[in-house]
Amino acid sequence: MREAPEACGPTYIVSTTSARPILVYKNGRIEPNTYADVIGAANALSTFASSLAGCCLRSVASAGHRILLLSHPPLSFLAVVPSTSVHMSVLKTRLNLVHAQLVSLLTLPAIRSLFERNPGYDIRSLLCGSGERVMDRLIGGFEDSPCSWLGAVRVGGLGGLGGTSV
């Protein structure tokens, strides 16, 4: 039985621009990458829109859901939400936070060089373990913390390494 759109929370999807799924977060947990068809269709629409002179597709709306698209090549980010849910500017802030966290974990030059050498590289192996837990906590905190609504995410401390220790 399918859940009512209002009962479903946002789904956050990170993929490569070639539609290879990296991370799917839904219903409070990271799920197996079962959204390849949605990712492929959204990336195809985004690519088509960007091929038109000066056009950029940012979102798609249907009767019950909205899809926000955000592209930071070689990565692509999607948020699928019920249409009565979160405002699009908040979703954009959240997707930018997910992008920033990924770049923090893997570094942008490393990501670019991986995809330049092998466009079909499966980057999920680099996120296994602690990287996946960090992403899980970040995205899971979106619903619990008002900070993500404002784009004011607290920076973690150094964990006992004060300014006097070197």
Image: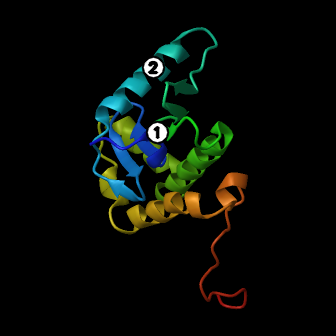
Q: Pointer 2: what residue? A: 45
Q: Nearer the viewer, mark 2 or mark 1?
A: 2
Measure the alpha-carbon separation of dots 2 and 1: 15 Å
**Which of disc 1 and disc 2 is earlier in sequence?**
2
| SS class, disc 2 | helix
Place of residue 46 in the rendered image (x, y in percent of width and height, measured from the top left): 49, 22
Under mark 2, the amino acid is Leu
Looking at the image, residue 50 lies above or below residue 78 = above
Residue at 63%, 64% (x, y): give it.
Answer: 145
Residue at 68%, 60% (x, y): give it.
Answer: 146
Place of residue 118 in the rendered image (x, y in percent of width and height, measured from the top left): 31, 37
Q: Pointer 1: what residue? A: 75
Badge 2: few (under 14), some or many (20 or more) residues near its Cα, within 10 Å? some
Quadrant assignment for the N terminus: top left
Badge 1: few (under 14), some or many (20 or more) residues near its Cα, within 10 Å? many
Place of residue 90 in the rendered image (x, y in percent of width and height, measured from the top left): 65, 45
Does 2 sit left or right of 109 as displayed? left
Residue at 48%, 38% (x, y): give it.
Answer: 78
| SS class, disc 1 | strand
